[in-house]
Image (cartoon, grey):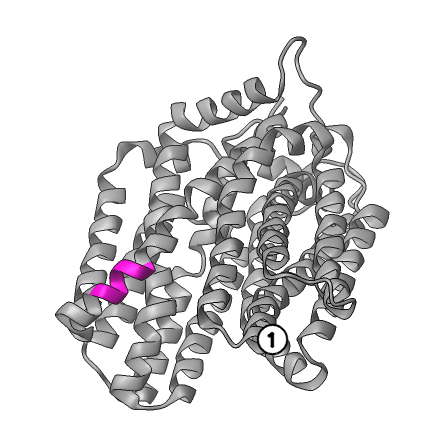
């Protein structure tokens, strides 16, 4: 029998939030370690080689690892169970991160080692994230909490880490050096693994750990997961929506804003202030969703959030206002878009059988990681050819077209049609 969100709150079960609190703590620590690794590894390469080209290659290796591994690891996550997969991913990440400073200290580190290790680090981080996403519905039910609120807190933690992680990593690199930061990163992954191993105790239903069907191997299970995603017009529509939105967001954050800060305001501090304002607004929007998300119409929330965020951010930038005005618009734009990610997580969880979470989340992670990598290169070329402001206007129009297309897509009406967590 499916478990409705009202049942999760009102059912006379023993409410236990220990597992959920430990899960959130582990997720925060693991994400912080991942953020520090993403900063420390390229920094270590440039500091030791002085080569921008090699630094770029390491960044590419990190990106490729994050694209390929989630979908390929999906069947393993569902077989192992979400808790075991999360713990093993953190332990593997700790060992891989530790290998870089250890090899360097023994004068055995070659550049190809770093490329392989960077690829493998992201290859285990992606499945670890998918496993932890999969734990949320069951832990929320045991805690007597709506799935919307649990996802909002989880995504709020992620946004907070994105705000402070690079800052903490940068300060630590300056104080203790990149090799010691990598060792500290390894400690964060171990701490995350310990928290989940000791305090997250899901039931068999919450854990996943689906036994493979007789005669069905890894390849067959992988194809089952992919077919499930490809046969669902709702999940495919969400994958397309997230992929295109991520592509536009990545181009904005990584290309448009740095160029804008230099050309319009002539200050690197303006870039940091603008990025932080967007992040702070998104945190507020996520908190609002956590408080009332179970009552909000899902499709309308995504529509208004996407359109409002696009108008405030891209429209504001196109008008080239004073920095103070733009910071205010950035906060409001972040607030408008803040509920979208936890809301979409909730929709995927409520439309996927529990024993397929690993495969479905993995497939969606991989599908939505490709477009952002391509968009940043394209937008950089467009800025040089067409100019900064016309490019911003074009991106804003694309965002609005994407939002309107979502409104016209009948598949997305299913977001509000079923708000239950399916059984395995």
Quarter of the image with the C terminus in it: top right
Q: Is residue 288 left or right of residue 299?
A: right
Using the rendered view, name the quadrant where residue 217 is placed: top right
Q: Is residue 15 above or below residue 423?
A: below
Using the rendered view, name the quadrant where residue 201 is placed: top right
Q: Is residue 64 visible?
A: yes
Q: Is residue 403 above or below residue 253?
A: above
Q: What residue does disc 1 label?
A: 48
Q: Residue at x 55, y 40 (%)?
A: 70
From the top left corner, tell me how far across and down residue 64 is, in percent.
49, 49
From the top left corner, tell me how far across and down residue 320 is, in percent.
21, 82
Residue 377 in the magenta stretch? The answer is yes
Q: Residue at x 40, y 37 (%)?
A: 415
**Which span is picked out in magenta?**
376-381
Residue 83 in the magenta stretch? The answer is no
From the top left corner, tell me how far across and down residue 264 is, in percent.
25, 86
- From the image, give the main secondary structure of the stretch colored magenta: helix
| Nearest to the observer: residue 11 or residue 313 | 313
Quarter of the image with the N terminus in it: top right
| Nearest to the observer: residue 351 or residue 158 | 158
């Amino acid at each position: 029998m499916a478990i409705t969100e009202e049942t999760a709150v009102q059912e006379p079960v023993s409410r236990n939030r220990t597992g959920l609190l430990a899960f959130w703590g582990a997720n925060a620590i693991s994400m912080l370690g991942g953020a520090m690794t993403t900063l420390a590894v390229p920094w270590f390469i440039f500091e030791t080689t002085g080569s921008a080209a090699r630094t770029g290659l390491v960044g590419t290796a990190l990106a490729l690892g994050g694209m390929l591994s989630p979908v390929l690891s999906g069947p393993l996550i569902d077989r192992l169970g979400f808790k075991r997969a999360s713990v093993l991913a953190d332990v593997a990440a700790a060992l891989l991160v530790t290998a870089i400073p250890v090899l360097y200290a023994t004068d055995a580190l070659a550049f190809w080692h770093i490329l392989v290790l960077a690829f493998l680090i992201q290859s285990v981080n992606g499945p670890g994230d998918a496993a932890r996403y999969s734990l949320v519905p069951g832990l929320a039910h045991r805690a007597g909490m709506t799935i919307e609120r649990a996802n909002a807190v989880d995504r709020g933690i992620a946004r907070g880490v994105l705000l402070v992680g690079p800052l903490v990593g940068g300060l630590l690199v300056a104080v203790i050096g990149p090799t010691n930061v990598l060792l500290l990163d390894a400690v964060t992954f171990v701490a995350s693994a310990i928290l989940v191993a000791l305090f997250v105790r899901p039931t068999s239903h919450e854990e996943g750990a689906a036994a493979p069907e007789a005669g069905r191997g890894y390849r067959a299970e992988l194809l089952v997961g992919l077919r499930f995603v490809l046969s669902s017009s709702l999940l495919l529509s969400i994958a397309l929506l997230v992929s295109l939105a991520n592509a536009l967001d990545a181009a904005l954050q990584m290309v448009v804003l740095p160029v804008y800060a230099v050309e319009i305001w002539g200050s690197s501090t303006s870039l940091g202030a603008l990025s932080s304002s967007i992040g702070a607004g998104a945190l507020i929007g996520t908190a609002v969703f956590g408080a009332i998300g179970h009552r909000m119409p899902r499709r309308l929330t995504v529509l208004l959030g996407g359109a409002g965020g696009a108008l405030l951010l891209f429209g504001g930038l196109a008008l080239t206002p004073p920095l103070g005005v733009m910071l205010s618009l950035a906060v409001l734009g972040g607030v408008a878009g803040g509920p979208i990610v936890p809301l979409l997580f909730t929709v995927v969880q409520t439309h996927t059988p529990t024993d397929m979470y690993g495969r479905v989340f993995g497939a969606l992670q991989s599908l939505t990681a490709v477009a952002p990598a391509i968009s940043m290169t394209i937008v950089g070329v467009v800025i040089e050819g067409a100019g900064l402001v016309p490019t911003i206007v074009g991106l804003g129009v694309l965002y609005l077209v994407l939002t309107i297309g979502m409104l016209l897509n009948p598949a997305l009406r299913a977001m509000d049609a079923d708000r239950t967590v399916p059984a395995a």
